[in-house]
Amino acid sequence: MKSHRYLILEKHLFWKIKNSDYKPKTSHFWFWPVFFLIIVMTWKLQASPLEAQNLKTGQQQWFKEAKFGLFIHWGVYSKIGREEWARELLRIPWTEYQKYARNFNPVNYNPREWVGLAKEAGVKYIVITSKHHDGFCLFDSAYTENDSLGARIKRDLLGELVQACREENLPIGFYYSIMDWYHPDYLPRRSWEKDRPAVGADFKRYVAYMKNQLRELVEKYQPVIMWFDGEWEHKNEDYDALEIGRMLRQLKPDILINDRLFNRAPGLGDFGTPENYVPATGWRNEEGSLRPWEVCMTLNFNGWGYNHYETEFRNAPQLIRQLIEIASKGGNFLLNIGPRPDGTIQPEFVERLKQIGAWLKVNGEAIYGCQPSIFEKLPFFGRCTTKENKLFIHVMGWPQDKKLLLPWLKNKVQKVYFLANKKKLNYFRKANDLVINLPEEPIDSVATVIVVEVEGHPQAEPFKIRPVKDGILELPIYLSEIKSQMGQRAYLDYFYRTTMLTNWQNVNDYPEWEFELDRGGTYELLACYAWQWGGKSTFLVEIDDRVVVRGESEPSPSIYFPATHSLGQVEIGPGKHLLRFKITSIANNNALKLEKVLLRKIKN
């Protein structure tokens, strides 16, 4: 997007050449070089953030290889203990909230301890809130008194963490909120605010303030990432998003900028930022190609900042498997914690971060620097990452027959072994598939990594779900894509040799299968799930966006052992189809544990 003055200059020059009788004289040897120099300078000065990105794609490499980052939401709101939106949620007046800001005093804050924990957890970079929506700055800012130097602590909290990171060679980036509930010129006000009239407020003055602070942050601390948020109340042009992107790149050409500076517009920004959910097929450009992306997700379930009343935390096995899934789809995992108001990190966070680090210490080669899976699907509960000529198979559900099948692997295999102890495994070819003989038990119940070394670059043919010989089409949960949006809670887990979808607490989470039928006909639809709680959840099944059945949960032998239930008959034609199993109401905070859906042919 070019500025008005440059467009006028270009149009004037072209018009003069095309429409006038002016012809450059040979004595005017300077004309054409100067003309084209102006055009080139115009393009360079007006290069969009995306164009600038394309000039420096190699500078994203460290980010794409890092895979695992630590997100830190910390600020005044931690004193209230009701997460980062506390002022909005509790409707705290501006003057009252500033009392919390003035008295912010994290006397036990030790940035070297934070960095030590991050290193032990195996993270490769940190992103911390330099300023959240409440407008309070963790750094020493020349443009506001609403910062950590103006608080009781009187320390540059951000600067101290930057120094600790540099001592350990750990890259650090800054979250910065475009929204600001403190600044007198930020608009709009909160809808419930009655004590802060907007008369005289000038949003352009706020944008100037924001630019000054961003320049200050980059020049003073040299972050590797600027991670924007809070953009949804305005359009890109309202806060000069493209100009800010250009300014940041001029200040630090290798800085990475997330897509939220640009209102998450497709193609802009260095990486996409799905929040609290994992995209089923990774983060894609409009034409379908994979682009750099990073899932930001809370370690707890309720809020990003410290929540004194939090009782729900993701467990370490779930988080490790989440990291594996994201890496297998080509993304990064930015795992968030919210430190306490005194500057310490609560034990639940510390424990889980150390457990992740222990797994990565053994298996990090299968995560860091890896490329996405070559398999569209795997016929077991597991994921694949790749690096050079190696396939890393992350087995999360141990096959009952002790046979691990890799479908349609095209390469010749050189050797197969466990990553943890390098013990070799026997294997054989069965038609187009590779079959690996497994021992009785896994090395790691969370995820055992098996390395398959092949000749050349790993390749596989697409895997298609089709009926077996007896006419039964099985749709196990591990062959589904879990569709979701912000607030994903459902995830796959392994219960006594059975993989099921569990923690199904959000009606927006659902599994989806794509399958093919050579012939159509009448099928009995069955669902295999575990359910033992009181009350009943309700659900529906869609085939090709058409609701074919509705039902409610029925009991099984226990919450860990599923039972198969007939849901009725459906007519399905030949060809490709899409089946979705959706929850419409949830009883007792967990809809059901789904193992698989089946289609049993009754007649042609």
Image (cartoon, rainbow, N blue to C red):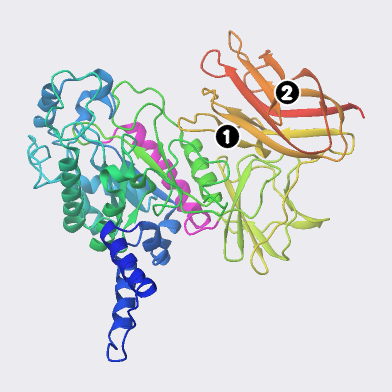
Mark 1 and mark 2 lie on one chain; the one further toward the N terminus is: 1
Q: Quadrant of the C terminus?
A: top right
Image height check: is 303 above or below 430? above
Q: Residue at x 72, y 24 (%)?
A: 528
Tag on residue 151? Answer: none
Work out how far the residue at label 1 is from the one at label 2, CA to CA, in angstroms.
18 Å
| Residue 404: % across, % down | 72, 48
In the picture, measured across the screen, residue 399 lies left or right of residue 575, that is left
SS of the residue under disc 2: strand
| Residue 497: % across, % down | 67, 33
Residue tagged 2: 527
Which one is nearer the viewer's eye here, 583 or 414? 583
Q: Nearer the viewer, mark 1 or mark 2?
A: 1
| Residue 227: % across, % down | 32, 47
Q: Is residue 81 visible?
A: no
Q: Residues within 10 Å of mark 1 (few under 14, many from 20)?
A: some
In the picture, measured across the screen, residue 36 lies left or right of residue 542, that is left
Q: Residue at x 61, y 10 (%)?
A: 536
Q: Is residue 541 visible?
A: yes
The amino acid at mark 1 is Lys
Magenta stretch? 345-371
